[in-house]
């Protein structure tokens, strides 16, 4: 008998690594190649921009900073290749490059025998007939370096132009979540990025965790305890800006690390002072673009905005955000309406409300 395997039909080249229209980002590079980076188009001329504006965000992203995350040592130093002169943007394409340092190709030798569960080895091989030999190639989390670098540029322009601030924090790890009242308070009055880093940082000892204010938490449960720390403290960054919850998350991740296992988590992001009028009906609504951007991140499985999935359990009278008195709009001096609640997540009809 003869068996026949039909290969996928040849495909025309397609754009797979570009996002955006007016502000357009194209990322490039494989996880264990020479480097990764981005080409950013649409940055206005005349804005002050150097590597020092971008590097802090890449440093925050870098793995190996904590006992709770992957231990690869990657410096992730960015270089601006084009689009600026004397620290000022020219209005032309900005090229960004981060060279790969920790190229552990031997760590992935087994993937030549069998694809890894939960990774893109199999689908890339079947779709393209070839794949990167190590580290996931374009499916690696290192692809996000280009996004972070480009995001730092966008954030700088938005803050300087509109006073927009973007901050995110970890609100859940496996089944350990911020208490509802704490989560609501953080969303209503978001912390600064520095506060997320400081209030989510613990020290891990052999028998406990400690916070910067002297609190001590059991290493196995994360509950408060009175034991004295033993051994040498190592940084345990959770980026959950609530010490009590951060300790429970750290304890859970410690147990998973000991068991050579892992888990997922939830990130909450708040954008304050967003410009009014962002979003284009019907297929380029703001929340649709945000969803596409977030869902294209490696390993992301869900996205919600405003009340999100909870909206289906609410009455219309509960979910609708009631308009309240008009107030002066810092973005243009005109008066704009505000809402008493924000179940819609700051958009109506796919267009940003400024909420």
Image (cartoon, rainbow, N blue to C red):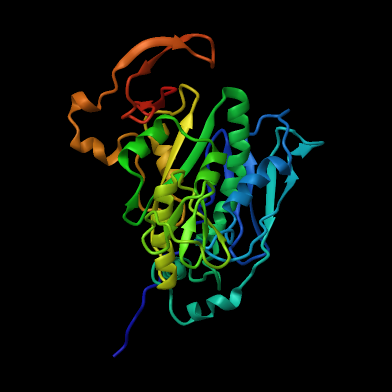
The residue at the point 43 percent across, 72 percent down is 258
Q: Position of residue 89 (x, y in %)?
A: 73, 34
**Considering only vertical position in the picture, is 108 above or below 90?**
below
The residue at the point 41 percent across, 22 percent down is 353
Q: Position of residue 238 (x, y in %)?
A: 48, 52
**Considering only vertical position in the picture, is 74 above or below 346?**
below
Inspect this view and state whether residue 284 appears.
Answer: no
- The quadrant holding residue 94 is top right
Q: Nearer the viewer, residue 64 or 115?
A: 64
Residue 1 falls left or right of residue 293: left
**Quadrant of the frame with the C terminus:** top left
Residue 47 falls left or right of residue 141: right
The residue at the point 57 percent across, 59 percent down is 63
**Considering only vertical position in the picture, is 161 above or below 58?**
above
Q: Nearer the viewer, residue 81 or 345?
A: 345
Q: Position of residue 285 (x, y in %)?
A: 40, 32
């Amino acid at each position: 008998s003869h068996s026949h395997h039909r290969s996928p039909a040849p495909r025309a080249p397609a754009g797979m690594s570009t996002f955006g229209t007016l502000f357009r980002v194209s990322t490039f590079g494989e996880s264990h190649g020479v480097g990764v980076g981005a080409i950013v188009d649409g940055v206005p001329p005349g804005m002050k921009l150097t590597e020092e504006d971008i590097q802090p965000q890449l440093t925050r992203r870098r793995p190996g900073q904590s006992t709770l995350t992957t231990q690869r040592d990657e410096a992730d130093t960015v270089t601006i290749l084009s689009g600026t002169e004397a620290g000022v943007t020219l209005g032309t394409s900005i090229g960004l490059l981060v060279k790969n340092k920790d190229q552990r190709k031997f760590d992935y030798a087994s993937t030549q025998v069998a694809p890894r569960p939960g990774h893109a080895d199999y689908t890339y091989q079947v779709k393209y007939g070839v794949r990167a030999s190590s580290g996931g190639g374009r499916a690696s989390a290192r692809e996000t370096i280009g996004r972070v670098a480009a995001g730092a540029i966008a954030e700088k322009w938005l803050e300087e132009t509109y006073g927009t601030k973007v901050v995110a924090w970890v609100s859940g790890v496996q089944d350990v979540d911020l208490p509802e009242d704490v989560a609501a308070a953080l969303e209503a009055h978001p912390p600064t990025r520095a506060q997320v880093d400081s209030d989510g940082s613990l020290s891990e000892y052999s028998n406990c965790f400690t916070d910067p204010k002297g609190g001590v938490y059991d290493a196995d449960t994360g509950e408060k305890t009175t034991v004295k720390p033993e051994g040498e403290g190592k940084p345990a960054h959770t980026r959950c800006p609530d010490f009590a919850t951060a300790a429970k998350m750290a304890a859970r991740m410690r147990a998973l690390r000991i068991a050579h296992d892992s888990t997922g988590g939830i990130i909450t992001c708040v954008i304050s002072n967003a410009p009014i009028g962002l979003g284009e009906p019907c297929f380029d609504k703001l929340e649709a673009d945000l969803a596409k951007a977030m869902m294209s991140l490696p390993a992301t499985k869900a996205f919600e905005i405003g009340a999100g999935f909870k909206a289906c359990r609410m009455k219309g009278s509960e979910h609708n955000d009631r308009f309240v008195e008009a107030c002066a709009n810092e973005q243009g001096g005109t008066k704009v309406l505000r809402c008493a609640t924000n179940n819609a997540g700051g958009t109506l009809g796919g267009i940003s409300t400024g909420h």
